[in-house]
Amino acid sequence: MPDLRDDVRELFGVITGRDPDGIWSAPGRVNLIGEHTDYNEGFVLPFAIDRRTLVAAGAREDAVLRVASTFSDQAIEIPLAELDAARGRAGWADYPLGVAWALGRSGADLAAVPGVDLVIDSNVPVGAGLSSSAALESAVALALDDLWRLGLTRPALARVGQLAENEFVGAPTGIMDQSASLLGRPDAAVFLDCRSLDADIIPLGFAAAGLALVVIDTGVTHDHATGRYGERRASCEAGAAALGVASLRELTVDDLPRARAELDDVTFRRVRHVVSENRRVLDVVRTLREDGPTAIGALLDASHASLRDDFEVSVPELDLAVETARENGALGARMTGGGFGGAAIALAPIDAVSRIQVAIDGAFAEHGFAAPEVYPVRPSDGAARDA
Ligand code: GLA
């Protein structure tokens, strides 16, 4: 990414009058399957995408953290000692400030480390459900870990990003997005057990099989800090408590008849989604290994149906995107991410991609929906130091 790297280095120079100590970057993610399973200690299978957030960073001589970015005119400056009092106040800057704060909660002595200038640029679309927030958290976490010589592992840095998001920003999200951003590998997905945090890299082989993974960004905005994501999480926790298990991960499809007998209808359907989705993640991993990516379409479709009907986090734009992609040659399609807007994905033969793009544009126009963005993404490398 030569261009973004030059831009961020140049802006760092303009703002600080010196060169950065380094440049770090981290990608957004697409979740192939395993939705609303992470905070239920279940399985997820996301991959890092070829859209990244870059951070140029340099140590300061005082104990101040300053963050600036190409997407805001205002730099935010705050003494490291005052981070705790600043929780949830700085808009987009809550993410980088939150990471510094969370590193303090995870063993870094914020009274002993130098202040840092951070300058940020990104080509991860914001609000598309591709985890621009996790890309930002992961790039900053890696930069501060290096500059402050903390030596934290990638899984520990993922926890730091999640802590920042949960307790500094105030969004009750799981560990999936940060794990994808920090652990992703080219042409592969991260198979994560969210209970043990064991991660396996699963080759995807899309291009070799003549397939493309298309993102359909509906443009419908979602915000995990607002209620509905938290409501779904609370239903899952209530279902687990009523069934006497620590998390829904403890249940299998064999437990569903008992769940149906003991739970109200809504809670039962939330539970059925999570239990069946965990099963589908394992089935996709096995199918990828045994039969390759052309064989996973039906599992993607089943995931979407479960999210739409049982978990009820889809919206008409996502349903239309998924149906239109399938009607025009996709092998499988589903919404990806938390839902209530954001993006869908479709796995399609490369030669069907332009037909799908045209058909989705036409279908959205026909329904009076705002024009979506439809583009392929490539499973890519996770966070790294770039310079
Ligand atoms: C959002 C959250 C993730 C995960 C998904 C749903 O992306 O950030 O932790 O819960 O929703 O699978």
Image (cartoon, rainbow, N blue to C red):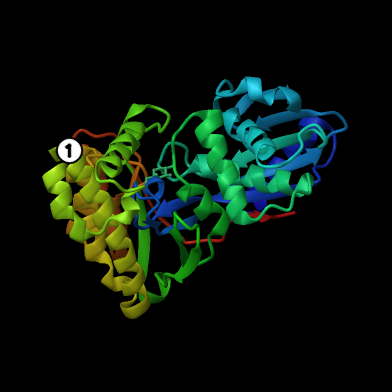
Q: Position of residue 65 (x, y in %)?
A: 74, 30
Q: In which quarter of the image is residue 122?
A: top right
Q: Residues within 10 Å of mark 1 (few under 14, many from 20)?
A: some
Q: Where is residue 320 in the image (x, y as percent from the top left)?
A: 20, 45
Count of numbered marks: 1
Disc 1 is placed on an element classified as helix
Q: Quadrant of ligand 1?
A: top left
Q: Is residue 91 left or right of residue 352?
A: right
Q: Is residue 47 left or right of residue 42?
A: right
Q: Position of residue 99 (x, y in %)?
A: 63, 37
Q: Residue at x 63, y 46 (%)?
A: 139
Most distant residue in the front direction: 244
Q: Which residue is drawn at 65% across and 36% down?
A: 105
Queried on whether the Cβ of the residue with tag 1 lies below 8 angstroms from ligand 1, the answer reads no
Q: In this view, does 2 lie to the left or right of 198?
A: right
Q: Is residue 276 visible?
A: yes
Q: Position of residue 60 (x, y in %)?
A: 84, 34
- Which residue is more in the foreground, 192 or 248? 248
Badge 1 amino acid: Val
Most distant residue in the right direction: 61
Q: Residue at x 75, y 54 (%)?
A: 387
Quadrant where the N terminus sits is bottom right
Relative to 99, say whether 214 is above or below. Answer: below
Q: Is residue 79 visible?
A: no
Most distant residue in the bottom direction: 290
Q: Quadrant of residue 214?
A: bottom left
Relative to 257, say whether 268 is above or below. Answer: above
Q: Name the residue under label 1.
A: 266
